Amino acid sequence: MINIGDLLGAYTKIRNPLDDKRVVADVVKNTFGLEIESSQVFFRKNTLILKVNSVQKSFLFIRKDKLLEVIKTSVPDRMVDTISF
């Protein structure tokens, strides 16, 4: 007989997406000094979407390559290829 715990064991390894959002918000705060909330961070396929105001958007767009490198190292499971605003 198959144990239900064996069948559902793979689901315990799924990470909470809110944790990844908090990590991204903390990285932006610590690296660039911008205060963003985890509710402003979204993941769609291989894209990181940041819903920020226009001033923060232009500030981060100029530093997009550095931000992408830092995000890739801090959240490697997400496989982020690009950042959208």
Image: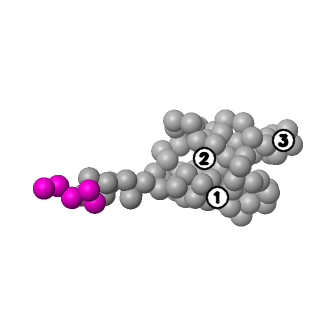
Q: Which of marks 3 and 2 is in front?
A: 3
Residue 1 in the image: x percent, y percent?
13, 56
> In terms of secondary structure, where does tag 1 sit?
helix
Q: Earlier in the sequence, mark 3 or mark 1?
A: 1
Q: Is residue 2 magenta?
A: yes
Can I make out residue 31 in this image? no
Residue at position x 68%, y 61% in the image: 26
Q: Mark 3 points at which residue?
A: 53
In the rendered image, the vertical position of residue 39 relative to residue 22, given as above or below: above
Find residue 18 and report its horizontal and vertical position in percent.
Answer: 60, 54
Q: Name the residue under label 2.
A: 68
- For label 1, the residue is 22
Q: Is residue 52 visible?
A: yes
Residue 5 percent coordinates (x, y): 28, 60
Task: Assign the C terminus to one quadrant of the image.
Answer: top right
Dot 2 amino acid type: Leu
